[in-house]
Image: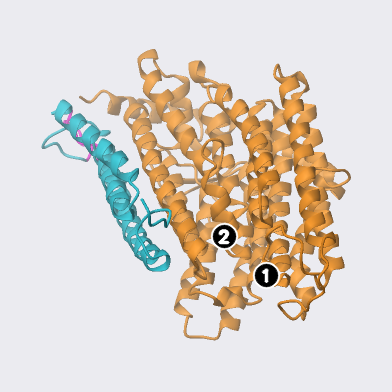
Amino acid sequence: MSHLIIAPVLLPLLAGILLLLLRPFAIELRRLLSLLAVLGQVILAIALLPIVHSGEILTYALGNWAPPFGIVLVADRLAVWMLLTTALLASFALLYAVRGSDTRGRHFHVLFQLQLFGLNGAFLTGDLFNLFVFFEVLLLASYGLLVHGGGRLRTRAGLHFVVINLAGSTLFLFAAGTFYGVLGTLNMADMAQKIALLPLEHQGPVKTAGLLLFAVFALKGALLPLHLWLPAAYANTSAAVAALFAIMTKVGAYSILRLETLLFGSSAGALAGMLNHWLLPLALLTLLVGMLGAIAASALRQQIAYLVVASVGSLLTAFALGNSEGIAAGLYYLPHATFAAGAFFLLADSIAQRRGEMDDRFEAGVQLTDGRLLGGLFFLVAVLIGGLPPLSGFVGKWLTLQASMTHPWMPWIMAVILFGSLLGIIALARAGSVLFYRAELVRPSARRAGALSLEVLPVIALLLLCSALVIRGAAVDDYTRATATQLLQPDVYIDAVLGSDHNRQTALSLNSTGDTQP
Amino acid sequence: MEALIALVIGVLTACGVYLTLRARTFPVVLGLTFLSYAVNLFLFTMGRLTIGQPPVIRPGIEQYADPLPQALVLTAIVISFAMTAFVIMLSLKTRADLGNDHVDGKEDV
C-alpha cells in the first residue's frame, strides 16, 4: 500500500494549519509557503499520473481498516486527472493573488489551502459519507474565500451561496442516510455491488436516494434549474477566487460522472442508466441558457459566469452520452473549460482595473493602457471559449459531436451545441468590441501599468496549458479514452477496492446479517 | 414508535422548508437549523430503531444497535453546528453591510 495517495490530501491540510500558525510572520514568507504547497500538489499529481495510467487503481485504507468497514481513498485515472487539473489551476490563481489581493482580508492563504484540501479529498475518497465531509470542507473554505475582501454585493452574493449550499448539504445527508438504511454500507464500491443485486422491493428507496444525490450534485455543478446561484457568486468575488472556483462546478460534474458510471452503471441491474433520462436534456438546456445569459450580461465578469454555466452544460452533455467516446470527450473538455474560465476571470480583473470606475460594465469609454496586449489575450481566450479552431475548445467540441453520432438524440445535440457556440461567439464579439474598440476617451489608467508581465503571466500560462492540450492532443486523448474505458468497467473499481472475491463474499454475508435485524 | 419518529422528522422538515423560504435572514437561519435537526434524526433512525441493545457484535447476541449511524450523526451535528455559527455571523455582516435583514437587501418588503 503506497502512502503517495494520501499525500495530496495531507499536504494542503498541513500547509493550511502551518499558514494559520505563521500569521505573525511576514506576508512574503506565507506567500512563498503557500506557493510551494501548491507546487508540491502539482508534483504529486504528476507523480501519480504514470502509476494510474498503467491501469492500476490505487487504494489506501485509512488506519489499515479493511474496506468496506474502514474509510478508503481510491486513486484511479479519473481522480488523478481531476487532481492534476485542480493543482495546475490553483497554482496560477495563487500566483495572481500573491500580487496583492491576498492582503485585502484575513487568512486568504489558509482558506485557499483548505479549499484545495476539500477538493483533493472529494476526488480521492471512495466513501459516500466522506465525500459529504470533504464537500463541507471545500464549501466552508469557499464561503470564506467568496466574501474575502468584503463589499456590499459580495456579502449579499455570499449569503445566497451559503444558504443554498446548506440546503444542498441537508439533501446530501438525506440521500446518504437512505442509501445506508437500504444497502447497509456507504463504501461506494460496496454500494455498487449491492445495488446490482438489489431485490425489487428495495429499488424504490435506492432510486429516490440516487435522484436526491443527483439533485445535490446538479446544485454544486450549476445544472439547470439549479444554476441561479452561480452568476452572482462568481461575478462579485475577487479574481483569484473566481478563477479557482472554475473547478468548483467541475466537482459536481465529477460526482455526477461517478454516480452515473459506478453506482448506476451498466452492471446496476434494474437501475442501470437511470440518470441518463434526466442528464442529457438538462445538460442541453443548461448549455442554451448559459449562452443566452452570456448574451444578455451587462458586465464582463457576469458574462464569464454565464459562460461557466454553459461549459457545465457542454461537459455534462458529453458525459450524458454514456458511451466511452462521450465520456472521453468530456474528460478532454474538462481541463480546457477549467483553465479557459480561470484565465478569463484573471484577464477580466486586469481589464476592469484599467477602466477605473467603469469597472467591467459593457459601456464604451476609456482607452485601455496596454490595450493591445490585453486585447490580444482577450481574443485568444474568446477563441478558446467560443470553440473555434485551432485551440482546445474546438477539439473538445469536435470530440463531443463525433461521440454523439450514434446517439438517438443526435440532431438535438448537434443543433444545441452548434447554436450555443454561435451565441457564445456573438456574446464574446460584442464584449470585445465594446471593451476595446468603442473607446474614445484617452485617460490615464486607474492603476499604474508597472509589473505588467507578472500580472498577465498566470493568464498566459493558463492559455499555454490549453494549447498544450492541443499540441499533446494524442497523449491526452489516449489518457481520456483509457479513463472512459476504466469508468465503464465498474467491476475493475470494485475489485480494486474490495480486494479478492473471497473478501467480497464475507463482506456481503456480514452485511446481509446486518440487514435482517428488526 | 416508528410513526412518531416519522411524524417528528416530517414536521421538522416542513417547518424548516417553510422558514427557509422566508424573506428575512433570521427565519432562514432558523429554518436551516430545523432542517439539520430533521436530517440528524433521519440519519439516526437509518440504523433501525432499537432500545437497550449493545452496539458491538459479540457471539451469542442476536440483536444489536447499529453504531455507524450514531457516528455519522455526530459528524453531521458538528458540521451543522459550525455552519450555523458561520451563517449567523454572515447574516450579521449582511445586516451591517446592507442596512437591513432582508435576504436580498431590499427594504420595502
- Name the residue that disc number 1 marks: A95
Could you tell me which residue is drawn at 60 percent across and 68 percent down? A37
x, y percentage for residue A53?
Answer: 71, 44
Could you tell me which residue is drawn at 78 percent across and 50 percent down? A430
x, y percentage for residue A143?
Answer: 46, 59
Say which amino acid is labelled 1.
Answer: Leu
- Name the residue that disc number 2 marks: A236
From mark 1 to mark 2, how far is it between C-alphas?
A: 20 Å
> Which chain gets the orange colouring?
A
Q: How many marks?
A: 2
Of circles 1 and 2, the one toward us is: 2
Say whether residue A14 is magenta.
no
The answer to whether residue A222 is seen in the rendering is yes
Chain letter of the residue beneath label 2 in the structure image = A
Say whether residue B58 is magenta.
yes
Q: Residue furthest left?
A: B52
Above or below, comparing residue A437 to residue A56 in the picture: below
Q: Secondary structure at mark 2?
A: helix
Above or below, comparing residue A104 to residue A279 in the picture: below
Say which amino acid is labelled 2.
Answer: Asn
* Start-end of magenta stretch: B56-67
Q: Residue furthest top?
A: A200
Chain letter of the residue beneath label 1 in the structure image = A
- Mark 1 or mark 2: which comes first in sequence? 1
Could you tell me which residue is drawn at 40 percent across and 19 percent down? A203
Q: Is A473 on the left or on the right of A338, as rendered? A: right
x, y percentage for residue A284?
Answer: 65, 30
Main SS category, magenta section: loop
Above or below, comparing residue A167 to residue A90 in the picture: above
> Which chain gets the cyan colouring?
B
Q: Secondary structure at mark 1?
A: helix
